[in-house]
Every structure is written in C-alpha cells, then in structure tokens.
Amino acid sequence: MDIFADVALLSRIQFALTVAYHFIFVPLSIGLGLILAICATRAYRSRDPRDEAATHFWVKIFTATFAIGVATGITMEFSFGTNWANYSRFVGDIFGAPLAAEALFAFFLESIFLGVLLFGRKKVGRLAYLVSAWLVWIGSCLSALWILIANSWMQTPAGAALNAEGTEAIITDFPAAAFNPSIYARYTHTVDALLIMGAFIAMAVAAWYLLKGRHTDFAMKIMRTGAVVGIVTSCIMIVFAHASAVVVWEEQPTKLAMMEGQYETEAPPLYAFGWVDEESQEVITPFAIPGGTSMLATGTWDTEYPGLNDLAETEQYGDLDPEAMPVNFVFQSYHLMVAMYGLIMLTAILAIIFTYHRGKIQKMRWLQKLVLISPLFPFIAIQTGWITAEVGRQPWVVYPSVSGPEGVSLLTNDAISMSVSAPELLVTLALFLIVYLVLFIGWARVIGRFIKEGPVMAAEGTTDGADGETDVVAVATMADVQDNGDVEVSQVVVEDDAAAGASANGKDGE
C-alpha cells in the first residue's frame, strides 16, 4: 500500500501520535494545577487538616501527570532533529529562543516549586507553601505560552525573512515573531480549554466518590470548586473561541474553506453537521444557515470568502490541490469540536445548579454518572481542535498567512528528512505504540491507587524519639471525618525498639 511507502505521511502520523499522546497529560497538569492552587488557598485560609489533606491529594495526582508529560514531550523534540530535519533547519533561527525560554523561565519554575510542594510541607511556612502552589500553576501556563508562540508562528509567520539562499527563515524582529497575529487568540483559547479539562476531571473524581458513598465532604467541596471553574471557563470560551476563529478567517483562508467544506467563493453558510462529498465538492446536510459563518465573522450575512478552487489559482496558494486535500476530515473534526462544546456547557450548567442548590447532586445518580464521564467532552474537543488547526493548514508546515512575510512558508513534503526511510518509521511507530501503552497503563494504575486511597490526613501530630525513629503515627482517612469536624482514628500504628511493627486498633472520639 502507498501509505506504507510514503515517508512524509508516515512522519506526519508518527508526529501526530506523539503530540496527541503528549496532549493527554498537558491539559491534566495545567487544568489540575489551578484546582491544586485553589485547594491550597482554601487550606491556607481555613487551617483545616481536611483541606490540607485535599491539597496533598491533588499534589500527588499533579506530580504523576507532570512526570509522564515531561517524558512524552521529549519525544517530540527528538522528532524535530530526525524526521523533520529540513523543517528544523528552516525554522531553527526562529524556534531557538522560545524553546530555550520555555525551559529556563517556565519549566524550571514549575519543577522547583513542585519540589517544594512534594518535600516542603513540614519545612516551609504556610504562606511559602501556598505561593509555591500558585507558582507551579503559573509556570505551567508560561510553559504553554512559549510552546504556543512557536506553534503560532508556524500558523502566522511574522518578524522574519528568508536568507539570501531562500532556504531558512531568519528572525528580524523578535517581539513581532513572538507576538505574531495568532498568538493572543490561540493562547487564550488553548489554555482556557485546558482549564475546562481540569475542572471536569476534578468534578469526575468527586462524582466517583459520591457514587461510592466515600469521602463525601471532600467530594462536595471539590464538586463545588470544579463546577465554578467549569462554568466560568466554559462561558469565557465563547469569547476566546470566536477570537480564534476570526484570526483563521483573516489569516488562513484555505483553513477556513476546509473547515466549512467550501470549494467555491461565496458567503459561507453555517452548518451544525453534514458530510463533505469531495468528488462533487459540496456539503451534504439537511440543515444550514445561509451566510451564517459570514455573519459570525463580519457581522453581515453577505460577505464572501474565497473557496479552495479560487485560492488554488492564486500565486500565494498555488501549491494547494483542492482534490487532494482532506476537506471532509477537517470539516468533521471542526464540527465535532463544536458539538463537544455544547455538551460541555450543558454539563457545566447542570453541575453548577444542582451542586449549589442544596447539594441535590448527592442524590442524583444519573447526574453523578454524567459528570463521571464528562471529561471525555473537553478531551475530544481539545484533540479535534488540534486536528483542525494542524491538518487544516496543509499542505504547508509553515503557512503562508495573509499578513506573513513574503516567501516565508514551507511545504510539508519539503520539511521531512531525506535520510529517514519508511521501514524505519514503521518500526518506530510500532515501538512508540508499545511504550506509550505501557506508560499509560502504569500512569493509570498509579492515579487509580491515589484515587482509591483518597485524601489522607494526619489525625494527630507526629512525635520523634531521641533516636530519630517515629514512635507514634496516627492516620485517618477523610472517610473517618464526621460532618461536625470530629475525627475517628481507625487505626493507630505504634512502633518502638521493643516491638517494631506491632499495631493496635481502637477509636478516639475526639
């Protein structure tokens, strides 16, 4: 089959696999980073051991996710120097600064203060611990900023020019390159989507505990936090998504045409769903609003946008072959993303209403089950959004945007390495699938163990003997904490030199 011999296509599939897998963990770390910081703030203000236990619970979840996210991100960077060597040569002068800044100003910030959260609970002050929690989240957001600066430059190049040989893009204005025309809209859109994901994960964990009848006090607090973050970020998404779409309309006309299945110049309709017949070059759908997309973009119903056939005849987009473009694939991914947003809003509204209306969600098992599976909605929306963004700019890896510098573009087929063969790509694809599956199973088992254990807190202070050994450790789970704030110690473990490991069961009502 041709697919097994097409080096460019196999390179794209391999990179898509690594990026999609990596982006399972990025939304979790950035999204849950905010939940962690909010819980740390609550614990700082209340000084309640239950809130401190909740904070430590999210620290463990965040750390496990952060670790595997770092590992999977390294694979992407290796791909730049192997499969995409020609691409790296073309954009090297542009990408060096933001990728270095991401490591120096963001990753190190996040890593250092994550260490404080992990190992400094008893070694730093309460305020320092709280500040560390927020700096971990801010560091993750800064990391996303520098990565999106690099990615957005590929979508809308700026502040650069071709070298004398016409083989490399040379930076001429770093601020213009960094703050290119699409970075603001794409950064806010992306990060807000990640925060939605984090909120829905938090609510799903709370729903699982409610279904099991465990840790209900913790579950309701997290459900309220997740519901508030979820509804706020979901509503703000309307603004951010519109701004991102406007940038596409203004800067990337071929992507807009693919998103709407538009082959001919017209005032593009608005479709809720449909199917693009690529042979007849028309959208098959029972429902469409004539001029609807034009209205959203410009405020008028009759503003015409060029179709793929007309764009392919221009000098700027002459490399485009409308018949070879995966128009239906982009159309479906875009509209699936929009459909998932509808489910996100519905779930967020139900969660905020029935969580704050006398806590009715505690008795609504159908809503608990909906919330439990709800992280699938933002996850699918995020993945299909990236598919739309990356496949929609084909056949270019550096897109010739409307306002971009003249000649600064690169075709995908010209960006691959000539020294990588199809068999090598097939072997590495198979190895990636195996390793990634093992990593995911390991991560899922660790996270599952943390969730099954739940938030654990020290019921009594720890006393150290003269020899440095712990004499008495008393541990209680949140399930043992009653609504009135009293603590039941279900098990007390006593260790000393005479009887190491002996245990005694009992209760302490106070």
Image (spheres, rainbow, N blue to C red):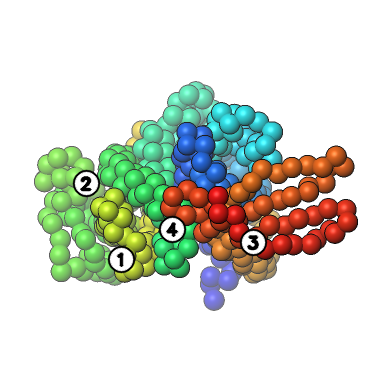
Residue underneath mark 1 = 364
Q: Tell me whether the residue at label 3 lies in contact with that at label 2, contact meaning CB atoms closer than 8 angstroms.
A: no
Q: Tell me whether the residue at label 2 lies in contact with that at label 4, contact meaning CB atoms closer than 8 angstroms.
A: no
The residue drawn where x is 56% and y is 28% is 127
Residue 412 location (% of width, % of height): 51, 52
Query: Of label 3 and label 2, which has the lower sequence position?
Result: 2
Query: Looking at the picture, which amino acid does disc 4 mark?
Result: Thr
Query: Of label 2 and label 4, which has the lower sequence position?
Result: 4
* Residue 438 appears in the picture as rendered: yes
Residue underneath mark 4 = 216
In the shown orientation, is residue 303 left or right of residue 190? left
Front residue of 242 and 105: 105
In the shown orientation, is residue 346 left or right of residue 189? left
> Looking at the image, is 397 positioned above or below residue 332?
above
Query: Of label 1 and label 3, which has the lower sequence position?
Result: 1
Label 2 to label 4, Cα distance in Å? 54 Å
Residue underneath mark 2 = 305
Q: Tell me whether the residue at label 3 lies in contact with that at label 4, contact meaning CB atoms closer than 8 angstroms.
A: no
Q: Nearer the viewer, mark 1 or mark 3?
A: 3
Query: Looking at the picture, which amino acid does disc 2 mark?
Result: Tyr
Q: Nearer the viewer, mark 3 or mark 2?
A: 3
Residue 4 location (% of width, % of height): 58, 71
Front residue of 23 and 59: 59
Query: Looking at the picture, which amino acid does disc 1 mark?
Result: Met
Label 1 to label 2, Cα distance in Å? 48 Å
Residue 158 location (% of width, % of height): 44, 31
Quadrant for the N terminus in the image = bottom right
Residue underneath mark 3 = 506
In the shown orientation, is residue 181 left or right of residue 161? left
Label 1 to label 3, Cα distance in Å? 35 Å
Label 4 to label 1, Cα distance in Å? 14 Å
